[in-house]
């Protein structure tokens, strides 16, 4: 990353030859190889060929999203009587959490990896106020 934060790719495979490649940049599924009816393996997901490709793309290919999925109308909401304004990244709305066009400028933050045998666990802590959201949120994803 521009700030020197390392970004890694982890490869998970099974006894049948399937393989998933997951990057710590946004937790994106970079590739997934699976067999067709004839047993020929091919990559079956859309992905980019480089970290720069992921940093520039806006389609959010294969990434784990942040605090929410879908749109928040008018880029804001009211919770317990307090109104929160969010970044407008979809016309007048806010689309998905942790997008590459976030106000943080760093894009999709790397997820902290932990390996558990043949599996991968990713984690990220979204601090209070990040992208306008209240409260600190600790998220964990487990990929068997």
Image (tube, grey):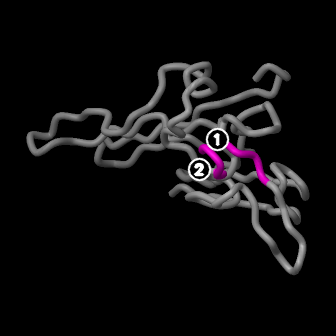
Q: Can you give x and y, in whole percent of width and height, for residue 20 in the image?
A: 44, 41
Q: Residues within 10 Å of mark 2 (few under 14, many from 20)?
A: many
The majority secondary structure of the magenta stretch comes to: loop
115 vs 76, left or right, is left
Q: Of helix, strand and loop, which one carries label 1?
A: loop
Q: Residues within 10 Å of mark 1 (few under 14, many from 20)?
A: many
Q: Can you give x and y, in whole percent of width and height, for residue 40 in the image?
A: 17, 34
Relative to the observer, which residue lies in front, 57 or 16? 57
Q: Which mark is residue 39?
A: none
Q: Which residues are magenta?
A: 86-94
Relative to the observer, which residue lies in front, 79 or 11? 79
Residue under the point 79% across and 31% down: 105
C-alpha gap between disc 1 and disc 2: 6 Å
15 vs 65, left or right, is left
87 in the magenta segment: yes
Quadrant for the N terminus in the image: top right
Please name the residue that numbered disc 1 is placed on. 26
Please name the residue that numbered disc 2 is placed on. 64
Residue under the point 48% across and 25% down: 48
100 vs 2, left or right, is left
Of labels 1 and 2, earlier in sequence is 1
Q: Of helix, strand and loop, which one carries label 2?
A: loop
Residue under the point 49% across and 42% down: 62
Image marks 1 and 2: residues in contact by CB distance under 8 Å: yes
Residue under the point 64% across and 60% down: 72
Relative to the observer, which residue lies in front, 54 or 8? 54
Q: Can you give x and y, in whole percent of width and height, for residue 127 in the image?
A: 88, 54
83 in the magenta segment: no
């Amino acid at each position: 990353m521009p700030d020197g934060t390392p970004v890694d790719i982890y490869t998970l495979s099974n006894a049948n030859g399937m393989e998933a490649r997951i990057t710590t940049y946004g937790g994106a599924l970079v590739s997934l190889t699976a067999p067709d009816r004839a047993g020929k393996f091919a990559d079956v997901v859309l992905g980019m060929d480089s970290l720069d490709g992921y940093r520039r793309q806006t389609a959010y290919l294969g990434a784990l999203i942040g605090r929410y999925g879908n749109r928040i109308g008018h880029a804001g909401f009211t919770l317990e009587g307090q109104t929160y304004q969010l970044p407008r990244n979809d016309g007048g709305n806010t689309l998905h959490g942790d997008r590459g066009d976030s106000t943080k400028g760093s894009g999709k933050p790397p997820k902290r990896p932990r390996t558990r045998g043949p599996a991968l666990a990713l984690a990220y802590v979204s601090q209070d106020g990040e992208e306008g959201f209240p409260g600190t949120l600790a998220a964990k994803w487990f990929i068997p």
